[in-house]
Structure formats: structure tokens, C-alpha cells
Image (cartoon, rainbow, N blue to C red):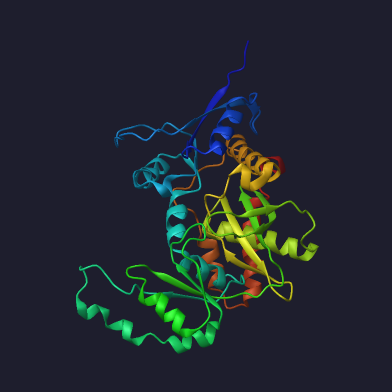
């Protein structure tokens, strides 16, 4: 008598990238797996087709890997509905869509939980839609530019508050240049950030997939021409562990299971988290190199297997309340971070094999 094999349906939101197709192919060709209860299951993975959708449609997918909804307004509208039907999303759509487009909130939350991030100011738009009356614009006259530049210093960076892929980031050297950039911003919301001085010509980019954190030596280049350098010994043991710890806290603080976290190592050897809202990490094999492409693919497949085998229930909205509670405590920022790390580790080390 043959044991029944449950089928786990996995959908992928992506476009023509080979990474998504590669993961689908691998999942579909895996041998049946055993879950934590000893029951067999297998995967059926496919690309999600963009078509008309009715509110009467029943749940189709058990798990969805979202590497594309942020680029497609139709998908942005339907993924919360699919999540409400108890589909497990990587990433949860509420975290994905909110923090990706509201980076100031993420920087503020990270600061409040004890993580070192650049000093950050958000600037209201220079102009507004006609919905607002002219009287609502008077607050622009009260910008305290002197206070901002005294706090942040020069050089500094100015960039879109909802920017992606390093687009629109400008390095500013004086107050005149800062005001000039703001004056031509039109309706764009901007962030102004302090510059973290580093003796290195590289940064650290962590691929964060499920419970795995993969630090990579990384050189940012404009026009999406990043360079990933294979070097397993470019960090000290202390830097490596601190970067792992911060990445774990950041991903749980923002509700991400797939993300890239970027760090700069300053002149004293201290890591600063400079960008951590990248829920569609670069998956181009030619850029990542075969080595990191394979690590990324295997980590994502492992996360999908964990969700299926451990029967991990989805959340409609990520539960960030434990971190909110920690941020309100009358203790030092270091103590807040240590408590947040303890909370985050419940996710990273809680597997059915440990129960």
C-alpha cells in the first residue's frame, strides 16, 4: 500500500528572471520529503499568472515567494487578499509594501531598538497636489537647515524616501548643494543622512533568507553594476557576529524573511546598518557569481522546505509587538538591542528538530 503524498503548491511572483525559474525547477524535481510528523509531501511550483481575479476565488497556493509584486500595481492589490486566505508569503505583503516605500520608519525603528544607523532626517515634499490649499504649505518656511547640517555634517547623502537599488542617491558637500537638491525635488519625499567614514572601498551586504544570514564583501556601483567578492575572511570574528546579530534583529523587526542588509565598517571597525529594506535581493547569477547565486537559491529552497515540513502558520500581519514593547522600556539602547536579539532568535533557532 502506497503512502499518500501531500502536494504543497508554491507560487512565484517574478518576471523573466532565471532565478525564479531555477528555484521552481529544483522544487518540482525534488524527491518527496518528510515533514516533522513523518508524513510525505512534495512540491508543485509555478509562476503566478497575471490575469483577472474574483473575490470569490478560493485559495490556490500554500506558499508564495514574492519577488515582483512591488513592481506591479495589480499584484500589490491582490497579495493581501491571498494572504488573508492563509497563504504563507515570503515576504509578508504588509511588511514588504510598507517598509519598502517608507524607509524613514525603518531607520527610526532600528535606532529605537538600539541599532547604529546613520543620522536621518525626512523632508516634506517641496510641492504638493492641488488637493491641499496654499495655506498648508507654510510649514516649508520653517525648515531649520542649520540644525540639520550641524547635526549631520558634510559630506552627507540625500535620497528618495522610497528609493530602490541606489537610484537617486546624491552625495552633498555643502548647504548650498543640499538646498539646491531639495528645491528641485518637486513632489518627491527625501531623506538626508549622515556620511559614515570607512577606510575600506567595500561594504558588507548580507543575503538574509529565512533563518540564514550570508555576509558578502560587496562594492556598490551605480547603474546596478554591483560587485560581489568571494572572501570568507574579510571580517573579524567580532564584526561577523555583530553583523549576524544586527541582521537577525532587523529582519524580525521589519517582518522580513527575504532581504538584503547593507553595512559600512567605520574607522573604528564598527558596523553601521545603512540600508535594510531590500526585500527583493539581487539574484542575477552574472553579478552574484555562481558561488553566491547557489547559496541564495539553496537558502530559499531550504526556507520553503522549513515552512512545509514544520507546518509554520502564516500571519496576516507580522507581529512586531514584542519589539514595540522593548523599544518603550526605560533601559539603555544596548540593553534594548540585547533583548530584541533574544526575541529574534526565537525565529532563527526554533525548528521542529529542536522541539
Q: Is residue 284 left or right of residue 191?
A: right
At horizontal 36% and vertical 43% (from top left) the residue drawn is 78
Residue 343 appearing in the image? no
Q: Quadrant of the C terminus?
A: top right
Q: Is residue 95 left or right of residue 341?
A: left
Residue 125 appearing in the image? yes
Q: Position of residue 163 (x, y in %)?
A: 46, 61
Q: Residue 323: which quarter of the image?
A: bottom right
Q: Position of residue 135 (x, y in %)?
A: 21, 80
Q: Is residue 233 above or below residue 117?
A: above
Q: Is residue 19 left or right of residue 129?
A: right
At horizontal 44% and vertical 40% (from top left) the residue drawn is 86
Using the image as rendered, state which of residue 19 and residue 116 is in the foreground: 19
Q: Residue 196: which quarter of the image?
A: bottom right
Using the image as rendered, state which of residue 343 and residue 61 is in the foreground: 61
Q: Quadrant of the N terminus?
A: top right
At horizontal 76% and vertical 54% (from top left) the residue drawn is 231
Farthest top residue in view? 1
Tally of numbered tags: 0
Q: Position of residue 49 (x, y in %)?
A: 40, 33
Q: Position of residue 284 (x, y in %)?
A: 58, 44
Amino acid at each position: 500500500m502506497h503512502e499518500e503524498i501531500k502536494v504543497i503548491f508554491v507560487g512565484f511572483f517574478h518576471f523573466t528572471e532565471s532565478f525564479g525559474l531555477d528555484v521552481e525547477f529544483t522544487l518540482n524535481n525534488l524527491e518527496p520529503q518528510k515533514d516533522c510528523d513523518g508524513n510525505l509531501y512534495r512540491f508543485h511550483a509555478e509562476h503566478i499568472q497575471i490575469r483577472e481575479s474574483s473575490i470569490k476565488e478560493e485559495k490556490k497556493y500554500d506558499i508564495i515567494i514574492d519577488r515582483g509584486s512591488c513592481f506591479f500595481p495589480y499584484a500589490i492589490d491582490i497579495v493581501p487578499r491571498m494572504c488573508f486566505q492563509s497563504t504563507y508569503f515570503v515576504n509578508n505583503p504588509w511588511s514588504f509594501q510598507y517598509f519598502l516605500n517608507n524607509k524613514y520608519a525603518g531607520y527610526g525603528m532600528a535606532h529605537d531598538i538600539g541599532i547604529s544607523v546613520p543620522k536621518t532626517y525626512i523632508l516634506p515634499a517641496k510641492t504638493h497636489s492641488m488637493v491641499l490649499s496654499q495655506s498648508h504649505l507654510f510649514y516649508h518656511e520653517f525648515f531649520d537647515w542649520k540644525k540639520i547640517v550641524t547635526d549631520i555634517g558634510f559630506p552627507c547623502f540625500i535620497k528618495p524616501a522610497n528609493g530602490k537599488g541606489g537610484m537617486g542617491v546624491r552625495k552633498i558637500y555643502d548647504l548650498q548643494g543640499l538646498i539646491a537638491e531639495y528645491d528641485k525635488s518637486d513632489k518627491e519625499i527625501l531623506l538626508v543622512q549622515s556620511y559614515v567614514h570607512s577606510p575600506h572601498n567595500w561594504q558588507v551586504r548580507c543575503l538574509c533568507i529565512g533563518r540564514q544570514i550570508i555576509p558578502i564583501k560587496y562594492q556598490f556601483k551605480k547603474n546596478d553594476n554591483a560587485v560581489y567578492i568571494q572572501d570568507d575572511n574579510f571580517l573579524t570574528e567580532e564584526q561577523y557576529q555583530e553583523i549576524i546579530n544586527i541582521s537577525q534583529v532587523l529582519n524580525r523587526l521589519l517582518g522580513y524573511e527575504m532581504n538584503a542588509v547593507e553595512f559600512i565598517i567605520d574607522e573604528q571597525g564598527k558596523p553601521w546598518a545603512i540600508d535594510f529594506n531590500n526585500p527583493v535581493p539581487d539574484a542575477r547569477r552574472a553579478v552574484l557569481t555562481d558561488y553566491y547565486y547557489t547559496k541564495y537559491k539553496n537558502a530559499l529552497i531550504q526556507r520553503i522546505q522549513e515552512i512545509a515540513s514544520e507546518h509554520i502558520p502564516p500571519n496576516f500581519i507580522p507581529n512586531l509587538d514584542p519589539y514595540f514593547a522593548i523599544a518603550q522600556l526605560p533601559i539603555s539602547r544596548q540593553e534594548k538591542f540585547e533583548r530584541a536579539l533574544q526575541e529574534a532568535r526565537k525565529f532563527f533557532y526554533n525548528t521542529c528538530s529542536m522541539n
